[in-house]
Image: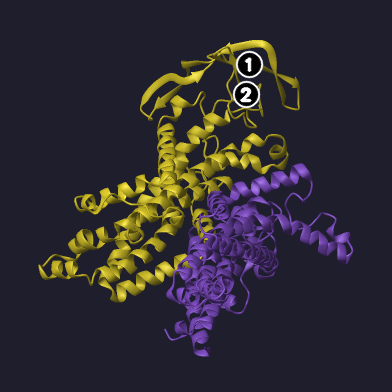
Amino acid sequence: MWQYIAKRILHLIPLLFGVSLLTYMLMWMTPGSFYDNLKQNPQISPEKIKELEAKRHINEPFYVAYSYWLLNAVKGDLGYSLAYKMDASKLISTRLLNTFLLSFFATVLAWAIAIPMGIVAAVHKDSIADRALSSVAFMGLSIPEVLLALLALMLAASTGWFPVGGSQSPMYDLMEPGEKFWNRVHHLILPTLVLAASSLAGIMRYMRSNLLDTLRAEFVTTARAKGMAEGWVIYKHALRNAINPLLTIFGYSLAGLLSGAFIVENVMAWPGLGRLTIEAITSKDYELVVATVVMATALLVIGNFIADLLLAWSDPRIRLK
Amino acid sequence: MAETITNVTAGTDEDIVNLSPWQIMWRRLRQRKLAMAGAVVLLVLYFVAALAGFFAPYGYERQDRDRFFHPPTKIRFDGLRPVMARYHLTEPGSFKYEPVADDRKPISLFVQGEKYKLLGLIPSTTHLFGTGDEAYPIYLLGTDQYGRDIFSRMLYGSQISLSIGLIGIILSYSIGVFVGAASGYYGGKVDTLIMRLCELIMSIPGLYLILALRATFPSNLTSVQMYLLIVVILSFVGWASTARVIRGMALSLRERQYVLAARALGQSNLQIIIKHIIPGTFSYLIVGATLSIPYYILGEVVLSYLTVGIQEPEASWGNMLNAAQNTEYLRNYPWLLAPGAAIFITVLAFNFLGDGLRDAVDTKSA
């Protein structure tokens, strides 16, 4: 197991290196820069800009600038945000936490609802419940996240049950600790629901077909032939085997989850990594763009890594490969 | 969905013997009502999109400066004749409109209106329906913040959204299939290199990569350039997953007897890939392509929604939804969300069709 983990971690290094090189290159090719805006500003002297540019190695060849960036990145310094005037790492850590919270709760919620839904649909195959659940899942699969998020905003705006976007109230700093916590939770509910709803359908459909496949397996027939109670057959024998492959789906669904979070963040003004990326792109704050893309990739790759570990832990055959 | 339709028999065995695989697939597909419904809806949508200028009562740029945020107008009937009431502003400044009693104008077919080009070529002024009178406008889905007809803009927007799906899928599948088939067929270093590249692209969360790519290009592009750019970016991100699947199939296909026979007969590698490997993946391709089209449609929607895609005044479903970003608009003028419903219907239709196709090509579950 340890060998497997070590191998996988070694695999991550060239990947993250490749991603950072690719994004850095893309940003390098981008027309215009943040400094162009600064040059328009009469209050900033040309010498100051030269100094800033020299600090970020803007006027040197690509590979020099990238090497400096990489060297710093290895030390944990992902560059400097010109628009926010602070270290990208510091800026990203709060945003990353927000994206993580949103994705984490949405995943937990989606799985907590989707798995029982899938089980009900599979056990009562072709019943009214199955058809209803399957069609709801189909609708859920087709509804675009942008629309769902806008509908949620409309609900919030017209009923006033939930705050309209953001992650905290304007008065947040003046609140008591208990109040602060509740304020945070209150803001988190709606984006979590939207994100969970958009990934729920896929998991439910997969769970259903998985369990159906397992229920057709011979060991289930054997268990039934032994005269075992049906509930015992389904929950003790079939379900355990049907849930195992779902761990792979967990890995796959992370990419969709992060893209979904990207949309939800931007529509619902949730200050996460996705929103920061857009802000950085519009203000041409390129080191920040590179940093956010690399961090989002790291989040995805580490998520996949955890999913693989869970899979290897639950299925010893995988470790041997 | 596969399990809900059980025991579908595709004719007797005798019939099947004389049919080509495509005919068998078509038979099985025809029996799936939802898939056929999806196909019909899509045909209608593409037909209307192709003739958008004719079906739309107004042009996409036309502004009615007297009627901002006009609610959807109801079609009333005078006996059997559909008529349109005249609306007037009740509270100036608050965009509230009321129909004027007994002031109506009949709606007629094939009315003369604004100039447009049918299929982008034939100039015409005939519109399918209308009142032919500016004082009695037909706004089936209301107007937006500039007084533009949302229904007409949605039809023009469908030209972009629907075609981006098709062109995007053709582009990315052409790259993905060819690269994947070659990679699987040749194996070795080429294979390793290509697969590492695919992994690299796939390990960056989709939208982050798309936006980083978008930022690499200038923002002041013509609408045609912008359209092409969106297709190219989405395809660049999308081809990797196709290539991986096709490569896996090619790996097993190249060991098949007919491929070995072709090689023994001295066919070139290129010929084998094109004639024997790629056709072997067709049944996957047709299903995969149908189910992936929504990705391109939604990709355009997100880019345009974030104002880095199709630019105003050009209409696309994504940039129309951008108006709904303002919560004040969203609460008071919910018809701004109409393009969202169009996206939903289109994606749903593609999913129904793709799901049916998957069942139809899956010969194991006859």
- Observer-nearest of B15 and B46: B15
Of residue B249 and residue A66, the one placed in the foreground of this image is B249
The C terminus of chain A, quarter of image: bottom left
Residue bearing mark 1: B85
Q: Amino acid at mark 2?
A: Thr
Displayed quadrant of residue B274: bottom left
Residue at 51 percent across and 35 percent down: it is: B314
Colour-to-chain, yellow = B
Q: Is residue A116 left or right of residue B358?
A: right
Chain letter belonging to callout 1: B
- Position of B346 with respect to A291 (left or right) is left
Q: Check the rendered structure and report the hue given to chain A.
A: purple
Q: Quadrant of residue A239?
A: bottom right
> Where in the figure is residue B58, as x and y percent of width and height?
52, 24
Mark 2 closeness class: few <14, some 14–19, many ≥20 residues within 10 Å: many
Q: How many marks?
A: 2
Residue A178 lies, in percent from the top left, at 87, 65
Residue at mark 2 shares a chain with residue at mark 1 = yes
SS at mark 1 in the image: strand
Q: Given the image, on which type of amino acid does mark 1 rest?
A: Ala
- Dot 2 falls on which chain? B
Give the answer, above or below, for where B3 lies relative to A54.
above
Residue A72 drawn above or below residue B38: below
Q: Quadrant of residue B178?
A: bottom left
Q: Residue furthest left?
A: B265
Where in the figure is residue A240, as x and y percent of width and height?
A: 55, 75
The crowd level at tag 1 (other Cα within 10 Å; few <14, some 14-19, many 20+) is: many
Residue A58 shows in this picture: no
Residue carrying label 2: B73
Give the mark, 2 or 1, whose residue is nearer the N terminus.
2
Viewer-proximal residue, A22 or A219? A219
Give the image's coloring scheme. Answer: by chain
